[in-house]
Amino acid sequence: MTGPLLGPAAAFYFETDRATIRIDKPDDGSIPFGRFSPAASGTMMVHGHSPWGVSPMPTPDNPPFPAALRLFSVAVIIVLIVGAGLFFAPVLVKPRWPWAVTPFNARFLGGFYTAEMVVMAALLFWNRWSPGRLVLVMAFIFTVIVSAASFINLGYFNFERKAPWLWFLVYLASAAVSGLFLWRARARPSVKGVALTPAWRGYMSAETAIVGLYGVGMLLFPRVVSSSWPWPVDPFHAQVYSAIFLAGAGGVYLLWKNAPREELLVLGLAQFLVGFLAILGLVITDAAVHRIDWTAIGTLCWLALFGWICMSGAFKLYTASQYFSSQPAS
């Protein structure tokens, strides 16, 4: 089955084993609503007008994960609530963080942890191969890189406190659990999803390369790459931030050939929140400390980068939501 292709279109095409069905868009611009047929899609049944809050039914190509993964998701979400506090309540969380963070670093980290919390909530809700494959791959990349950066920069941690020990425990355990579930499902193919146009695949390939190379630069040359950021970023934080870009690049790479509906939705939501909260956090923090030169080339480039990430996520959300809501009635 194929869904809406790149960009707004006047019609939607659905391919089954017997025919290609065309559904025309009404003249008023609305999208026809319907439901998936398991026989046609082999993936799920979705009722109603929206994908938000509908859980996939068990199907052969999108089986549930063990219940143990839901327990893992709950534990991670609880930890991420603390991380999100760096954005919403930095005064309360900063003194309890494993290392000292400046106001801008605190809000940036808090924004990312908020986005990650939403992504893990999607895994908790669905708990299936799709979107679990995407979430676990991104989580594995992020936790492994952050763990490595933490070991390289042990001088930032005061091990006389409990927080650093908990930090390493949480990250090493998360990397091990996500890696274990991915290893056990390594032979399982991805769920069939949206058939992307060549232009859409080309864009996602370019997105993977740009975001991935930027992440590699932040990891290997942290001082050089982070020197253009609006606020001073030390090598440790730059290497931690590299994990955000590399995890994002890994997620986009997974979907550039085949984009299952739930995975496209989750990736779009993650990118939108990362970009939006990064910019919002910069604005909120500078309103209090007044240290950002908003006309500097580095600041404008940084705003353009995260604005692009935000818009790219919004477009994926739009495409995924159209695909969900435009299915023909069975």
Image: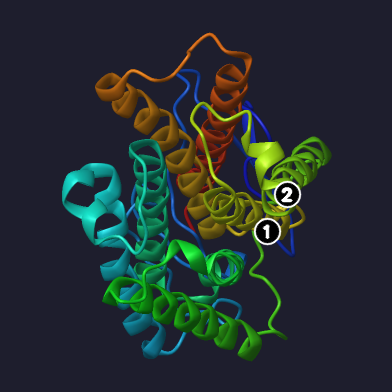
Q: Amino acid at mark 1?
A: Gly
Residue at 35% over, 59% down:
117
Q: Amino acid at mark 2?
A: Gly
Residue at 26% over, 69% down:
78
Residue 190: x and y in percent read: 67, 71
Residue at 50% over, 85% down:
177
Could you say which quadrant of the image residue 153 lies in?
bottom right
Left or right of 321? Residue 67 is left
Crowding at dot 1, Cα within 10 Å, few <14 / some 14-19 / many 20+, comes out as: many
Residue 263: x and y in percent read: 55, 58
Crowding at dot 2, Cα within 10 Å, few <14 / some 14-19 / many 20+, comes out as: many
Q: Is the Cβ of the residue at disc 1 closer than 8 Å to that at disc 2?
A: yes
Left or right of 92? Residue 189 is right
Specify the quadrant that holds the N terminus. Answer: bottom right
Rendered image: mark on residue 166: none
Nearer to me, 327 or 221: 221
Nearer to me, 186 or 171: 171
The residue indicated by pointer 2 is 212
The residue indicated by pointer 1 is 250
Q: Is residue 328 visible?
A: no
Residue 271: x and y in percent read: 52, 43
Where is 296 relative to 131, above or below?
A: above
Q: Is residue 43 visible?
A: yes
